[in-house]
Image (spheres, grey):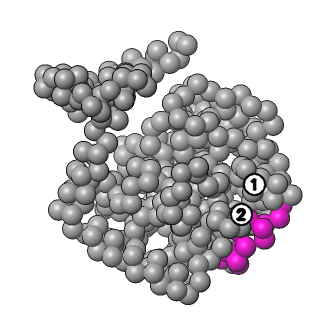
Amino acid sequence: MVRIVVGGDVCPTGRIQNAFIEGKADEIFHDLLGEIANADLSIVNLECPLISQETAISKAGPVLGASIKCIQGFVAAKWDVLNLANNHSFDHGAKGLQETMLTIKREGLSIVGVGENIKEANAPLVKEINGERIVIYSMAEREFSIADDKTPGANPLDLINFVNAIRQHKQQGTFIVLIHGGKEFYPYPSPEMVRRCRFIVDMGADAVICCHTHCPLPWEIYADRPIVYGLGNLVFEPLKKQLPTWHEGYLASLTFEAGQVRLEAIPYFQSQALPGAQKMDKNGRKQFRDEMQKKSAQVKDPGFLEDRWLQYCRKQKETYLSGLFGYNRLMRKLSRLLLRMLYSKMEIQRALLLVQCETHREILNTIFTDERRGE
């Protein structure tokens, strides 16, 4: 029997940073420490580089980074593996990522999901535990952190690479897939995310665990294998705008025995009155699990998921179209009022063609990536 615990997004900044630096694991993970320490293998997503100096890159979205000394909090809590396949691992460029990887390895912890180039980033982590071989394969959606042939970074969410990897390594043992993706703050997986995760199981994965949404998403058992669509934050400073689900999450406890796998969700609150994460009480656990089980049933209804996703996307329409057409802040505000005047049907059709067609999308990606490199 092998028990593996997987934790969500950790960003050791703000008021929790000193506890990480001083290795005060009990002030960070509180009563979750036993779940971490008693696992045969514990994995957590480190959502920012650990750096000695800032070398921030130019990107859309926030740039995150924490003191290199924060590694002591992970060591003291007895995490075994830090997953770096996420959208912030390259926030301080190659230097920041390389320093992070070196720091983690120097302290005797393992990393997964990144490398000096795409070949290294695509390599799974293999562990021998209780006579069983465990293979961990991690991917991240393509933002500003992805590795290529010459640049260090994260392993991209590429199903062709995944299929090649599982064909090569599945025979070695239990195969667990970690994915950093989904829409932040949206409480369900998108229809495409469900389709993608189920395909990964169809190809032979024994479990799929997702992070990134900053809120807990439901899980399901598909083909006798667990798919977790979003663990939520594990330790992340509160936002200025209060969002209750920002403070909720769960550890995924996976027990593998005789070819079977069992999932247990361990819910907690994080970064509320006290910094760090603490287990929910009995009533909180019941309410949380009831809500997740309700959503898990809804995930199995494709009509429900499609309808919810369409409603959400309609609410995001002005924001996304303004970003696509390159409007500044003033024009984005105006676009919400003058949408039909600003975008003709033909302009919408042209934009749809560019983002929908695989080849056109590849051309756009190449053009924009080349422009960014030429800054």
Q: Where residue 139 appears, x then y in whole percent?
A: 48, 48
Which span of residues is magenta-colored?
23-35
161 or 232: which is nearer to us? 232
Mark 1 burial class by Cα count in 10 Å: few <14, some 14-19, many 20+ = some
Q: Where residue 207 appears, x then y in whole percent?
A: 44, 66
Image height check: is 3 above or below 120? Answer: below
State left or right for residue 145 relative to residue 191. right
Image height check: is 47 above or below 118? Answer: below
Tell me the amino acid under the disc marked 2.
Pro
Mark 2 burial class by Cα count in 10 Å: few <14, some 14-19, many 20+ = many
Q: CA distance from mark 2 to mark 1?
A: 7 Å
Tell me the amino acid under the disc marked 1.
Arg
Quarter placement of the N terminus: bottom right
Quarter placement of the C terminus: top right
Furthest toward the left, the residue is 345
Per the picture, the main secondary structure of the magenta-coloured stretch is helix
Reply yes or no: does residue 26 show up in magenta.
yes
Circles 2, 1 touching at the beta carbon (< 8 Å): yes
Looking at the image, can residue 308 be seen? yes
Q: Residue at x 50, y 76 (%)?
A: 265
294 or 173: which is nearer to us? 294
On the image, numbered disc 1 is attached to which residue?
A: 15
Q: Residue at x 23, y 29 (%)?
A: 339
In terms of image quadrants, where is residue 6? bottom right
On the image, numbered disc 2 is attached to which residue?
A: 275
Q: Residue at x 58, y 56 (%)?
A: 9
Q: Where residue 116 appears, x then y in whole percent?
A: 63, 34
State left or right for residue 63 relative to residue 344. right
